[in-house]
Structures are given as structure tokens and as C-alpha cells.
Amino acid sequence: MSWTEIVIEVARTHAEALSDALFDAGALSVSVEDADFGTDAEQPLFGEPGMEPTEAAWERSRVVALTPVEADQAAIVAEAAESIGLAAADLAFTLRNVGDQDWVRLTQSQFEPIHIGKNIWVVPSWHDAPDPAALVLELDPGLAFGTGSHPTTRLCMEWLETHAPIGLSVLDYGCGSGILAMVAKKLDADTVIGIDIDPQAIQSAVFNTERNHCDVAYYLPDEFATSGHAHTFDVVVANILANPLKLMAPMLAGRVNPGGQLVLSGVLATQVDEVAAAYAPFIALTVWAEQEGWVALAGRSPVTVPDGQ
């Protein structure tokens, strides 16, 4: 079976409404892209938690609608334009043929095993592990953040591998897919806890952890508060973003046992000073490593000295 894509370039102000209107007019799926993708004018579109963009659109947006090949694409565009108060003549469009493909196989071919650090492999379920004797995580791309492809995740995994938490308790705050918690457990950590504010991330982490035969418990923050687990850990890892990390400095630092270690990532090299300053009253953090403009900060909690000693 073949399909036809309708490709329309519009201003940011019309992208979202046009996407909805094309759906209503009979499109099977609609996506919005940066019309300047791959050029010097390309614009990143992302936000930190609590600061997400209000709309998924760019100043010059490209709206792509998938339709059956036998559909009347001109009529679909005309109906969509009318529904949002535009003249069809104002929406110039082009058509692209989409041939029949094995979409599952095509998607899978885009994800190969990822080698991280010295001895860690992240392997999609449709691949064999290149080195079965290595620390292998079976992990498919999904909705929760963390497959090892992003520098911030790799930095944390490499830190854990370098400082193997054998017999220690580990907290993965902002656990996403559970990848860091699973690495810690496979490196012989004792108790490993993952916390995330997103229930869908918790579901993803539980699924991944069961698949990888790891003993990790995952909680939403409120659930963890009443879980009965110890609330401080020998190692606390948080791979989030700079702004929430700064806001959570007292809480995250307070989760670290005296003499324990705190590892933060999701921090750009340009944000190091401000993040380190937020944690300075609690733990002195320094740059452990940097990859592609992202850094991992690490530090050890002071050991409390009893009075009189």
C-alpha cells in the first residue's frame, strides 16, 4: 500500500491550528517540522520541566499530512484552510509519494547497539549483544528518557562504571527509563531506588527492569515518602536539567549519606558555575567529565564529625 504526503509551509501562528484541521479533514497523521532544518537558520525547540514551549511550532513551520494515495489532497487542504479562516489559495502545498515499506524493520534499523564506557552495551531487543560477557542492558527506544544515546545519560553511566557502587545504596532521581538504576544494580549495588514525577516513566522503568532481571524499586515522589525505605543513600544520581537541579539542591543534597557521593548531569558546560553555586552550601561539586558540551558534576558529602572529637 502507498500513501501521499501533503507538505505545507506556514508561519508559526498557523501551524498548530492547521495540523488539527488537516486531521479533521481526513489526514491519517500530521507532523510539524522546522522548515529550516539542516540550515544555519534551524531552531532548537525544547524546554526544561515547567518551561516547555506552549506550542510545537517554528517561525517557519512545515506541516506534513499523510493521506491515502486515492484521497483528494486538494480538497483536504481546502477544507482545512476554510476551517481555520484561511483561503485555500494562501496554502501552497506540494505532494510526496510514500512507497510501501516494512515500517517496523525500517524503524528498527535506525537503532543499533550502543557501546558506553569500557564494558557497557545498550542493546535493542531485536539485536544480539556484541559482547554477551559485558554489562548488557536490553532496552528499546520508548517514551521515557534514557537509552544511552544522549551525552548526559552516557556521562552518568560512565561515572557509575568508574565508581562501581558495590554493596552501596543508590538513588536515581528522575529515573526516566530506569537505565541508570539498572546499571547501578548490575554493578552490584545493594539497594537501588528510582524516583520520577512522571507515572508513564515509572511504568517504563518497571517494564525495563523486569526485562533485565534487576531488583530495583520505583516510586513517584509522594509514594516514596511513605514507602518505608531509608531516605538517604550512599550514591545519588540525578540526570535532569540545570534549572530543576538548582531548585532541588537542598532536597537532593539532603538525600546523600555523610561521606556519600552526588552525581548530577543534564548540565551544559556554560551552566556549571550556577549549578555548583546552588549546591555549594551542602556539597562541593566539580566537573567530572564533559561530552559534546554537556557535563557531569560530582562531589562527596561532608562526613559529620560528632561534637567533642
Image (cartoon, rainbow, N blue to C red):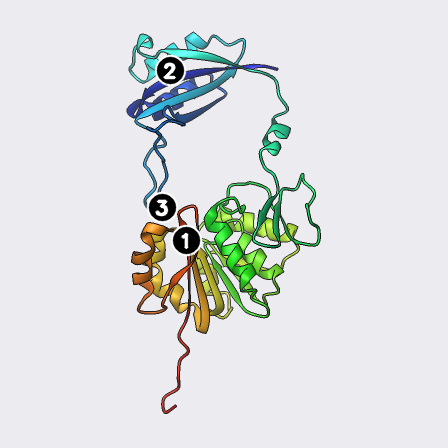
SS class of the residue under badge 1? strand
Q: Nearer the viewer, residue 73 or 63?
A: 63
Comparing marks 1 and 2, which lies closer to the viewer?
A: 1
What amino acid is found at the position of numbered circle 2 in the picture?
Ala
Tell which circle, 1 or 3, labels the residue nearer the N-terminal end: 3
Quickly name the residue at label 1.
Answer: 295
Give how far apart the Cα atoms at labels 2 and 3 are: 33 Å
Q: Which residue is mark 3?
A: 48
Q: Decide: is 55 above or below 289.
A: above
Q: Residues within 10 Å of mark 2 (few under 14, many from 20)?
A: many
As drawn, 262 above or below 211 = below
Q: Are marks 1 and 2 in contact (CB under 8 Å)?
A: no
Q: Residue 209 placed where, x, y %?
A: 61, 53
Q: Secondary structure at mark 2?
A: helix
- The answer for how far apart the CA atoms under marks 1 and 3 are is 16 Å
Q: Amino acid at mark 1?
A: Val
* Residue drawn at (59%, 68%) of the image: 166
Which mark is nearer the camera, 1 or 3? Answer: 1
Q: Which residue is mark 2?
A: 80
Residue 181 occupies quadrant: bottom right
